[in-house]
Amino acid sequence: MPNKKRNRNNTISGQRIDDSLNVNLSKNAIRRNKRKNKIVDNDTPREFLRILKYKEILEKKKKEKQNKSKVDSKRNTSTELKIQKGESLGAFSKRVEDECRISILKAQTVDTKKKQKKKELSN
């Protein structure tokens, strides 16, 4: 089996093939040259960088979960109250009435708490 690697010392019209010129170089040789000539600004090991990226991703996920939970708590009940597939109209109306009662009770407890605080402040 013949050796298919090209000799880098081949000459073209009496000149040595220059590494900066990609004349008569195989694709693999060109890739090798790019890797060798690549200027590295950061000398941090790759594995350490990978671990740092993974840590950043985990922190982003935690923040997204916290933001999502805040948004869920503030979500409007009117958007939730949609008839579901296979749900009868009677069951839907019952669910709507229950939600309305709960929201009214929450509003009343908030109002009473505010009134109690005002009374305490005035005393």
Image (cartoon, rainbow, N blue to C red):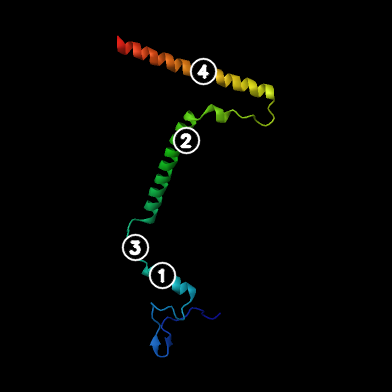
Q: Nearer the viewer, mark 4 or mark 1?
A: 4
Disc 3, SS: loop
Real-space Cα separation, disc 4 to disc 1, in angstroms: 69 Å
* Residue 80 against residue 100 in the figure, above or below: below
Is 7 positioned to the left or the right of 80 in the image? left
Disc 4, SS: helix
Horizontal and vertical percent position of residue 71:
47, 33
Are dots 2 and 1 in contact, CB under 8 Å? Answer: no
Is 37 positioned to the left or the right of 76 in the image? left
* Residue 115 against residue 12 in the figure, above or below: above
Are dots 3 and 1 in contact, CB under 8 Å? Answer: no
- Residue 40: give its label: 3
Horizontal and vertical percent position of residue 115:
39, 13
Identify residue for label 4. 104
Q: Which of marks 2 and 3 is nearer the N terminus?
A: 3
Q: Which of marks 2 and 1 is in front?
A: 2
Horizontal and vertical percent position of residue 18:
38, 81
Residue type marked 4:
Ile
Real-space Cα separation, disc 2 to disc 1, in angstroms: 44 Å
Q: Nearer the viewer, mark 3 or mark 4?
A: 4
Real-space Cα separation, disc 3 to disc 1, in angstroms: 12 Å
In front: 38, or 117? 117
Q: Earlier in the sequence, mark 3 or mark 1?
A: 1
Identify residue for label 1. 34
Horizontal and vertical percent position of residue 35:
40, 68
The residue lying at 47 percent from left, 29 percent from top is 74
